[in-house]
Structure formats: C-alpha cells, structure tokens
Image (cartoon, coloured by chain):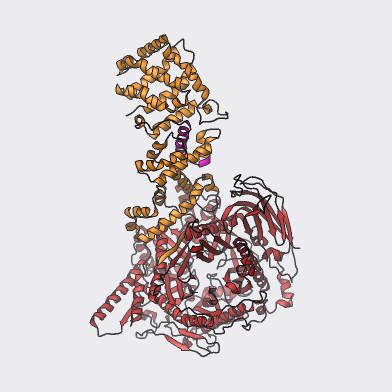
Amino acid sequence: MTSELDIFVGNTTLIDEDVYRLWLDGYSVTDAVALRVRSGILEQTGATAAVLQSDTMDHYRTFHMLERLLHAPPKLLHQLIFQIPPSRQALLIERYYAFDEAFVREVLGKKLSKGTKKDLDDISTKTGITLKSCRRQFDNFKRVFKVVEEMRGSLVDNIQQHFLLSDRLARDYAAIVFFANNRFETGKKKLQYLSFGDFAFCAELMIQNWTLGAVDSQMDDMDMDLDKEFLQDLKELKVLVADKDLLDLHKSLVCTALRGKLGVFSEMEANFKNLSRGLVNVAAKLTHNKDVRDLFVDLVEKFVEPCRSDHWPLSDVRFFLNQYSASVHSLDGFRHQTLWDRYMGTLRGCLLRLYHD
Amino acid sequence: MPGKLKVKIVAGRHLPVMDRASDLTDAFVEVKFGNTTFKTDVYLKSLNPQWNSEWFKFEVDDEDLQDEPLQITVLDHDTYSANDAIGKVYIDIDPLLYSEAATVISGWFPIYDTIHGIRGEINVVVKVDLFNDLNRFRQSSCGVKFFCTTSIPKCYRAVIIHGFVEELVVNEDPEYQWIDRIRTPRASNEARQRLISLMSGELQRKIGLKVLEMRGNAVVGYLQCFDLEGESGLVVRAIGTACTLDKLSSPAAFLPACNSPSKEMKESPLVHPPSHGCRSTHNSPIHTATGSRLTQNFSVSVPTLIYTGMGSGSAGKEGGPFKALLRQQTQSALEQREFPFFTLTAFPPGFLVHVGGVVSARSVKLLDRIHNPDEPETRDAWWAEIRQEIKSHAKALGCHAVVGYSESTSICEEVCILSASGTAAVLNPRFLQDGTVEGCLEQRLEENLPTRCGFCHIPYDELNMPFPAHLTYCYNCRKQKVPDVLFTTIDLPTDATVIGKGCLIQARLCRLKKKAQAEANATAISNLLPFMEYEVHTQLMNKLKLKGMNALFGLRIQITVGENMLMGLASATGVYLAALPTPGGIQIAGKTPNDGSYEQHISHMQKKINDTIAKNKELYEISPPEISEEIIGSPIPEPRQRSRLLRSQSESSDEVTELDLSHGKKDAFVLEIDDTDAMEDVHSLLTDVPPPSGFYSCNTEIMPGINNWTSEIQMFTSVRVIRLSSLNLTNQALNKNFNDLCENLLKSLYFKLRSMIPCCLCHVNFTVSLPEDELIQVTVTAVAITFDKNQALQTTKTHVEKSLQRASTDNEELLQFPLELCSDSLSSHPLPPAKAVTVEKASPVGDGNFRNRSAPPCANSTVGVVKMTPLSFIPGAKITKYLGIINMFFIRETTSLREEGGVSGFLHAFIAEVFAMVRAHVAALGGNAVVSYIMKQCVFMENPNKNQAQCLINVSGDAVVFVRESDLEVVSTQQPTANCQSSCTEGEVTT
C-alpha cells in the first residue's frame, strides 16, 4: 500500500511555525521529519512517523505555493487563493525575509550578481547554512535591491512599502542595499571582528547624512548613492593637515581641553598628528570609487587599530573625537565648518561603533 | 421580456504576462449571456487594466435568467494571430432573482482557466431589473428560494412543509462527443463546465416550478448531483423539500414579488389535484424501462425485515386516542403525496413524532446511451422504483413519511448502483397542512407529548412487529415502548436527552469481485450487495456496543463500485439516548469448547472487549442512571439468545430480497468465533484507536454533550489516494488497507489540527471512490471547532429539564458536586444519575445558547474573510441573511503534472482555487460565510506516464451574512439578560 496522493487544504491556510522555520532553513522533507522527530513531537502528540511525514510534506507544498507570492509581499495580501489572517501573513513575510548574521557578513558589500551566486556553495560550506537557505537569502537581497534601486524617496520607506517588512528589518535591508550599491569592502581579515549590526549602524548614519536624499528629499536621486558633490568638497578638508600651523593649533586646542581628562593623554598627544592625518586623508580620498570601497578598511587601519594598540578605553575615544570635531570651530583660518560637521558628525558615530574588540 | 441584466466590467489585476516581449498584456473582456456578446475596449500594455466599461445590457426572458450563467472571458488582444484566452468567470445570477437575497453582485472574481488555474482577478458589477409577470403558463420560477441547509434556515419560520420535490435532466457529455477528438482539452472542459452550469440552472428552474405548483416559496435541503455516466451521458438530478417559509422579522408570509399570487393557482384547474403537481413534467409515474437491458432488481432494507402484506401500522392500544388522531391527520396529509419524503435532517420542535428506523434501497442498473435528452424517462423510472421501495419499507415500519432522505449513485464503466436512504418517521401534521388549526393543535401537543423521548417510541404495532426487536418501556417516560437500539439518518433532535458525549462510528468493508462485463457484472454486484449491507450493519452494531452507546444518528452508508471490488463505508454518530435501554456487552463464544488453550484465548479476548467498553464509557462520560428493573416495570427480557442472520426470501414479483439485520438480544450481544474471518473482525474492532485527548468527532451538525463552541472554526478538505499492490489481494488484506487508510487519515487530521484542542471535528464526511483498478480514493470534508473546556460541562436547563428536576428533589444537591470537580479538570468522573445533558440548540428565535458563552477574545473580524462550514450555523454568530445558493462546478486539467508538483501539488492547488472561487462569489454577493457547504464530487483521474491529470469538483452551499453575537450584544444592550451582560463586560476587558 503506497500513498499516491495525500493533501490537506483548509479554508484558512494552516501555517506551522516550526515547519516553516525548517523549510526556510532549507532542510529537505526527510531531514525536516528527522528533526521534528528529535524534537519529541511524536511523544507529545502520540502521532506516528507516517503522520509526521505526511504533515511535513503538506506544509512544504503549501510553502512552495506561497513562495511565489512572498517574492512580492503585497501580492500575498491581495491574492484570493490562500485565506491567511493578517498576523500570519506578516509572520510569513518577516520570516521569509529574515537572514542569518553569518550569511549576511559574507555577502555584505559584494555585488549582488550571478558571479557571486557561484560563491554561495563556498559560503554554505563555510557557514554551515544550507545552500537552499543561502540562495533564498541571497535572492531576497537581490530582489529588494532591484526593486528599490531606481526609486526616489526614503530607502527604508520604499523597502517597507514594497516588501511590507517590519521597521527593524527594513532598516537592515536598507543597509544591505546601501552597502551593495557602494560596494564597501567588509570581508578583509581586519574587519572580521565587526558584526552586521556595526555596519548597519554606520550605513544608517551615512544614508542620513552623506547621500543626496539627506540634503534634499525632493531630489530625483535617492538614498542609495553618496552625494558626489559632497565627496568632491571633502578635498577642502585637507588643509587641516596640510597647513602646519592649522594642524598645530588644532592639536593644542584639543590637548588643552583634554589635559587631565584622558587616561591615555600622553599617547593621544604623541599620536594626534597621525590620527588627524588619517581621518582627514580618508575624507580627501573619497572622490575615488576605489577608496570609497575601502572606507571601513581605512578607518580601522588609520584610527581604530592605532588607538586599540595603545589601549584607549572607549570613553577616551569618545572624549577625543568630540573634542577633535568641536575644536575645529575655533580654528579661525578654517572656512569649511559645515562641511566638516557633515563629515565628522557621521564619522564620529561610525568610529565609536567600530571601536571594540 | 421580463428582465434586464446589466453588467459592468471595472478592472483587472494580477493578470498573467501574455506578451513575452514586453512582459505585459493587452487585455479586453467579452461578456456573454445567452447568444448576446459585448466587448470592452482593449486596455494596452498592463497587468492591471482599468476598463471601467459602460453598462452592458441584456434584455432576456426570466427563463433564460434562471438557466444561463453569465460568462465573462478575459482575452489578450493580438493583432496578427488569434486572440489568446486568459481565462473565464461564470457568474450564476440566480441570487439576484429573488427579492430577499442579494441586490447586486459586485467584487473581484478569480479569472479561471481549466488548464492554468487562476490567472489574476477581475472586478465586475452585475444587476438585474425584473418586471412583474403574471402569466401563469410561464416556464420560469423566479422567486423561489433555494437552500442547501437541511433544516429550516435560521432566520425563517416554516409555515408549511409541503414535501418532496425532484427532477432530473440528461444530456450528452461533451467529453464523449465526436468533436472532442478534434478540439483542444480547454475547449472540451469549457463546453462541459458550461453545459453543467446550464443544466443546473434548468434543473433549478424546473424544481422551482414544482414548488410553485405546490404553493410553496422555497426549497430546503436542496441536493443536486451529477452522474457522469461516460459514454451514455450526463445526468444532473436534484431533490429537495418544498416549504412555505416566512421571514422571522416580517410577521406575515408573503410570496416573492414576481410570483403569481396563490389565488390564481387555486383557480387554475391545471394544478389540481396537488398529488399530480408533484411530478408534473412526466405524467406517467412509472415508465417502462425500455432503455435498460437489465431488469433484475435488487433491494435491501436496513435494519428492517419487511413482512409482505403488512398493513400500514395502525396505532397500538397503548397509543391512546390522541396518537391515533395524530396518525390519521398525518396520514391524510401525506397520502396526497406520491413520495412523503423530506430531505431535512433537523426539524422544528414538535415536527418529528416518532422514528421507526433507517430505510434504504439499492438497485444495480446497466447504463445505456441516452437516446433522447428530452425524454429522461429511463433514469426517472429507475429512481421512481427505488422511491416506491423506500416508501413501502417505511410503511412496513408503521411510518408514513421518510425524513433525512438522500439519494446517491456509484458508477463504474457501464454499471451503476442507485442508492436511496432515509429514516422512516411519523410526523406531526400541523406543518404539513395550511395552518388553520395550528394554534389549538400546538397547545395540545405541548400538553400531551413528552417531546424529549417521544421520537424514540416505536411507531409500529407491538403485536405485529415488522422485525424481531426487543422492546422495553421508555427509560424516560416509562409509558411507551422503545427499541433497544435506534439507527437514523437525521441529526439528533434538539430536545433529545443524551447521556455523555457522542462519537464518530465507521464501518468499513471491501469485497473483491471478478472483472466481468455487462449483465454478468451487474449480477455479481447484485449478489454481493446483501452481504455487504449485512456486514456493514454488523460492524456498526459491534462498534456501537463497544462504545457503550445505543443510537446512531446521521447514518450514511456508501457503497462504491470499482472494476474488481466493492467498497462499503458507513459513517454515523453514536450516542447514548437516555430513553433507550442500556446496551448489553459483547459476548464471545468459541466453536470448539474442548480445546483448553483456545478457551483461554477466548476469555482473553473477552476481557479485552470488556475493558474497551469500560474505557469508552469513561472516555465518553457515559454513566446512565442505575434503575432497577422493578421500577421500570418492563417485561423481563428473554434469556440470552444468539444473533442469527435470518433471511427470508420473499418471492415477490420484483424479486425483492430482504434481510433481517436486527441482532436480537439486548443485554448480551454474542459474537461467534468460528473461523479466522470472525477472528479478524474481533481484532479489527479492537484496533480502532480513539481520538487523542481533547478531540471529539461526529458526522452530525453538532456534537451531543458539547454546547459551548467558540468562534474558532476551520473547514478543510483532505484527499488521499492509495495504490494497492495488485499481487494476490485477499478480502482481508483489502479490508486492512482500507481500514488503515481511513484510520491514518483521521490520525493525520487530529495531528494537523492539534493547535485547536479542545476541539471537535463536526460533520465529518467521508467519500470513497475507486478511480482505477488498484486505486482507492478517500475524500474527507469536515469542520473543526474549538470549544471552551472550562464550560464543557455546563448544563442549560430547559423547561423540560426543570420539570424533571422538580420530580426528583435531591437532584440539585447531586448536580453541584460533580460540576465543581469537573470544571477544573477534564478528567471524567463518574457522574450521578441526574447528569443528563440536554443537547441544547438554538431555537429559531432566540439563539439562546450562544448568549451563555463568553465573548470570543479575538472579535476583530478582518475585511474580506469568508468563512466556510458544512454546518448550517456559525458558532458564536447569528445569520442575518441568506443570499442564495452557491453551486459551482469546475474542471482542471494539466499536461505538465510533474512541473506542478505531481498529483498532490496539482490537486492541492486546485482545491485551494475552488475554495478561493467560492469565497470570491460569496464576497461579491455581499456575504461573509458559506454554510451547509458540501463538496459533492471530486473526481480525480491521472495518467502519470503522459504527465497528465484531470479533476472535476462540484461544490455547493448557502451564501449568508452573519453577525458576531458579541457585536450584536454590544449594539443592543438595551435589554440584556444577566448572562449576556456578564459575557459582554468580560469580552471588553480582555480585548
């Protein structure tokens, strides 16, 4: 006796959260059944393995049919085939678009093209996430990217509107899209200590302050591209390190203000010029795409690592950066105060987030 | 020209991409009714076209309005080649034809294609302007309301229940016409869908005409079926119960607007006498069966032995003068009718006086091509024969009427089994005649009839019993005689006293049969049938006893014929009726008493059976009052006696074979184990696993003993097909396979719905078909309803019960104790004698039982949700309007079965689509639920080698508008009862 056909269709579509998770995690029906058996469900319910097999198959089939709709979540809301309560719809969408930290760290800042897809095999092996799940997550990134790529207005709002994600998840996707678009390097060994959350935090600050949308939300261009004009202008900051008098004055202003307040004062005093040169040079180089990509590598090399090797505590880093940015206002010969604030305001936030072990 | 149909095409959305180059579609719409077609403009390059068309107007006869569906076709415009069809929508405009139902159909309809399934949606508005037409010779019957619900619909009152209406129409099946060889599968499917839609419309109109002739205004319990007879044609047939209904809000009974007034009917000599009116279109009641080559007829009645020549049961001496009067009135009311049948399964209080038992008849026929579709006489004659037989069976039981009546067929190649069954009953005449003496009769009824147990009392003459049964005095009133077990096809009467809970009981059976042709095949089937009936009955009886119960409700026996086997599946809900005697246990007797080890084995089995009975009694909370024999004063039962198959071959002209299926003894039911078969039977009895804790199941509307439903419901359909290994199949192996299939299916359902615990599967409806040699298909539709565990033992005191309590003064004390115990733990304590739970159901006016429940916490009904349920009501809600019947037929075919996920993927998607289309139609009518939903047919055929599959599905139900009780109460808190108030505030606090 073999089962040729075995289906269950409810007027309200039944969604089993546990099976949905297994499906999202890319397990085959057989593996999912084995995992469910291990969870002790048979003992709890008195069901047989055959029942579990049939139930799992059924849910997988439903999810498979729903997947097409999940690719365009508003369709899931308007379709008539599956009657699903709104709270369940939200859960389906949110879980479908959720991603693994380990996975996102692998692809963050990479071009979301077919070439990268071939690397999914390697990522799967490296992270232990099934290839199927990797593919879903990668396709999600790519799909969101494609939809919002050419759109005006707020990136987060666009994502939320077209994919009906929660605020938190929409912000994460905004970061992913932003990183993919600007191709920031995040995979270097010295950046490995950073989490997706660190990058997402920086992305949000940069979207808020460094993009065209940040200046004028009515602009045709949007949140995804950095403000080219702004990047050009950043060259003007070079004077802060090129002009020796200005550099000395800046140093003395900072040192005066921080004397006795910093545990690592002597180290700061000794390193000031190096650090300042590093930060200003990063700004000046941002006109080149190549250097934009290396932004995080540069920040870590030029600032985070030197401070860390001298064992600066985070509170000292904060004191220093605050004073370092604020003191520029007292430099009489310096005319680019607004530009400096736009640059340093964001950079300070990023650096503080990036500064940890 | 009595009607104007107006259609407006508003917009489309989610259309499929028809032009690969642009990834877009140039869509336009054709609107067709009858022979008239309109077209919208082409909306270029969009998947969400906004046509916003003018009103397309069709001026048509109301006859056409009833018959024809509105056909909307969405196409993709192509300049160079033929336009490609995207899909179609068929809209049945019948609901717009009676005044009280929907006034407009407006909404998004899924665009359906028989090859691709649903492809986007279209927004359509439909209206009908009807002109009054008083022509009494007209052929239309606009205004007659149709209900699938097999009880009087909730917001109506039955003024008169007229009786049985039936009709059938036949046609050639387009799939088998010569042209099918040259046209595409799509064209063939669409021709079929359209034809069936037309035939259903015609059928409904003809039934409506009969109802008007009987001076009714509605059909309740309308059941329409298709017989796909293959080469020999397509039969659409319907039965129902004609009624005159009165809307509860409006006090006077009015016939619908477009109806000819009843006065005119009286004047018309054509409609007299009424008995003639029942079958107007075919004048001769019995046709000569020219078309059928097979004249051999065969019938079995369950569980009765029919004595030929037995008169219509005169009232026994214990009946009293009133009973006799009642009987006379009923008789005269029913005698006018050719078939005193009622498709209802639940009745207004007082309607059902006595129930005799199940009557059924089957007949095996050989199909022959229908030569003239306009003369469906052969099929008519077949059914007439069967109905005659049912009628005579009922008579033999001393009953004048048959209630819970239904008909079905099973077809395999050219052999067809026709089946009919119902419950013989004696009815109260007051609903059957014009209500002139209604008032005084009602009074007398209230006084004289102990309604709670009255229906259990035997209608037949005790001294001239139609079959050997064991009668005792009723355990409730102690005045009248009752049988030891009672089988019925109806729902449990609302006022019946039941002890404990009920449960689903199934008998399953397979019999191998040799492949044969024509007459030989039909004869072989005919010969097998009585044995199957007998075994099914035995199984039911054994299982009932094993559950410690004494009555079956909603009994439905389905016999399915296949190429090489016959399947029997009987489902019913077992209960313990307080009025009937306690069932005896099951005794096992061995044949070879000398063998010691064998004896031991027997006693071991006996112990197991006794344990099971004890366990079941605990599980279903069956603890009947212990009443000593002296108090009852019943005749001392005869000593134990073995049950025997009594077979009397009556040599009547039409070769009616009759069986005695009544198993004698009351207190001990003996199973003889004389061979391995019997051993198997006993084993299979014990292998039936009860549902996991927290689950109950029944195939009736509601579960006896549970009355605190929450509003959480889930209707579902589950389909399974198994392939038998064809090697040396035996009856035993086959039985085991079939049994496992059903049991596993149930187990899967329990597992899937575990989040709804505590929960009851209601209206569980199994359908078996044998699509191919080695395939068995089982389709189950049911609704799972969560109930409130904490109130599970709440008893509602009806006035009847109050009087009972007055009789025994110490009842109150006894009641309180177990209630406290049980409210915090569901463990079933042995309950004191008074623990007789009255199954309380909504009275037509009050819906009182819903009030007692606390308001559901999640009352936020979201827009667009359409509930579907096979029940006639929605828990926790009140139906405020019936919008008309939904009766839809779909065909889906694929030539890329693997790509669509195999057979399971294909059928899963199709059923989901069918649900979606039903919901869309209901929503467009302005409704938010379908009640009395039923999937009447699900014919699935596959050819995996060719990567093909085809499926036909037919569903029906009543579209309704419901309002949550909680919402109602919030609106009208002016005069709330104490109960209601408390539940309201509770609900508000929790939300």
Q: Residue furthest bottom?
A: B651
Residue B980 position, x and y percent, is 49, 55
Residue B344 position, x and y percent, is 55, 71
Magenta region includes residue A171: yes
Chain B colour? red
Above or below residue A190? Residue A334 is: above
Q: Where does the N terminus of chain B fall, quadrant-wise? A: bottom right
Residue A14 position, x and y percent, is 45, 54
Q: Residue furthest top?
A: A245
Q: Is residue B180 left or right of residue B719?
A: right
Residue B878 in view of the camera: no
Colour-to-chain, orange: A
Residue B147 in view of the camera: yes
Above or below residue A61? Residue B309 is: below
Q: In this picture, which residue range is highlighted in magenta?
A: A162-182
Residue A227 position, x and y percent, is 51, 25
Magenta region includes residue B749: no
Q: Main secondary structure of the magenta part?
A: helix
Q: Residue at x 30, y 84 (%)?
A: B591
Q: Is residue B9 left or right of residue B865?
A: right
Q: Is residue B883 left or right of residue B528?
A: right
Q: Residue at x 43, y 14 (%)?
A: A240
Q: Residue B550 or A114: which is nearer the viewer?
A: A114
Label tally: 0
